[in-house]
Amino acid sequence: MVEQLQDLISNITSIEIVDVLIAIGIIIFFRIFSSSFSYIIVKMFKFKTKNKAQIKENAFYNPLRIFFTILGIYLGVLFLKRPLNLTNEIMSLITKVFEIIVIFAFAKGLAASFRMESIFVKRLRKTWNSKLDDNMFEFMLKVIRVIIYIIAVFIAITLLGINLNGLVAGLGIGGIIVTLAAQDTAKNLFGGLIIFIDKPFNVGDWVQFNSFEGTIEDITFRSTRIRTFENSVVNVPNSIISEASVINWSKMEKRRYKTNLCVESSTTLEKLQKFEERVREMLQSREAIYDDSIIVRFDQITENGINILVYTYTDSVDYESYLSEVESINLKIMKILKEEEINLAYESRNVYIKN
C-alpha cells in the first residue's frame, strides 16, 4: 500500500500542469452549470410550467444538481486516469462509488416526489380524496419512501459485489437476537397500523390517555408525537397507544354543564318554583345551550337544605369557550338568586360540649 502511494505521488509530480487544469476546469464547469442542466431537464418534463420557482421546487431538481456535480468530479478523475496511471481496480472502485451516489440521488428525488406537498401527490390525492384521510395517506407515503430507500440499499450492495444470499445466510446466525431486538419495533409498527385503521384520533386532535394529555402533532411508524399543555413534546410508542383507552376530546359535539345548588330549607315553595322557572328561561335564551337537554329540578332534601339540580349541554366544546360559557351561566344564576332573595345553604355541624 505504501509503495502504491509513493508511485502515485511520483506520478503526480510528473503530470503536466495542463492536464490538472483541464480536470479542475471540468469539475468547476459541471459545478457551476449543474443548476442550469437540472433546470433544463426538469423543464423538458414540465414544459407547460413557466414559473421558475415551481421548477426548482421539483423533487428531482436538487438530486439532479448533485448528479451533475458528482459527474463533473468523475469525469475529471477519468481524464487524469492515464496521467496518474490509476489501476483498473482503483477506477472500478471509483466507478462503483459514482454509481452508488447516483442511485441514492435518484432515490432521494423519487422519495421526495412521494410527499404531501409534491404536485404528483396532490393530483393523486384528489383521485383518492373520498377513500383515504390525510393521516392514512401520509402513512402510506412514508411506507413508499422507506421501500424506495431499501431498494436503493440493496442495489448498492449488489454493485459492491456482495452476495445477498450469503448476506442473508450470515444473518441467520444472529437471527434470534435480531428478532428479539426488533420485537418492540414490530409492536410499535403494528400499533401504528391499528391507529390508522381504527382512527381514534387525527393530527391536531386533543387527546388524553394514561398520564398523557395534549395535541397530536405527528404519527410515525414507531411513535406518536404529542404537544402537551405545558408546551413540552412527548413521543409515545404506538404499542402503548394501541392498548390504551384514548379519550378524544376533539370529537365532542357538546359539553355538559352540571351544578347542584343547595338553598336554605326555609325557602318557600313559591320562591323555589319561580327560581327554577327563571333559570330554565335563562338557559333557553342562550344560543350555546341545547334546549332539549335543560333540566332544572328540586331533586333532594339534604341535612343542610334543599338541593336544586341544574343540568344541560352546551355546544362550546373547546376548553376556553366552555369556561367562558360556564362563567356566564353561573353569574346569571347568582343574579337570579339575589333578585329572588334566596340564600345558599352551607354545611353546618352541631358541636356539643360536655361539662
Image (spheres, rainbow, N blue to C red):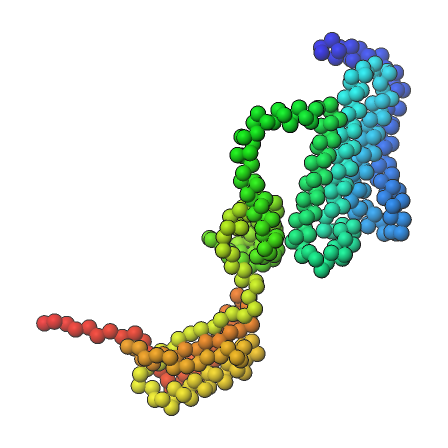
Mark yes or no: residue 321 visible. no
Relative to residue 192, is residue 341 drawn left or right?
Answer: left
Q: Nearer the viewer, residue 18 or 300?
A: 300
Q: Residue furthest left?
A: 355
Q: Residue at x 88, y 42 (%)?
A: 40
Give the x, y percent position of residue 261. Answer: 38, 77
Q: Quadrant of residue 264?
A: bottom left
Mark yes or no: residue 103 visible. yes
Give the x, y percent position of residue 256. Answer: 49, 71
Q: Residue at x 83, y 23 (%)?
A: 77
Q: Residue at x 53, y 57 (%)?
A: 207
Q: Nearer the viewer, residue 147 or 50?
A: 147
Give the x, y percent position of residue 12. Answer: 81, 14
How many marks on residues? 0
Q: Quadrant of residue 92?
A: top right
Q: Quadrant of residue 277?
A: bottom left
Relative to residue 218, is residue 83 drawn left or right?
Answer: right
Is 69 situated above or below 305?
above
**Which quadrant does the N terminus fall into?**
top right
Is 334 situated above or below 197?
below
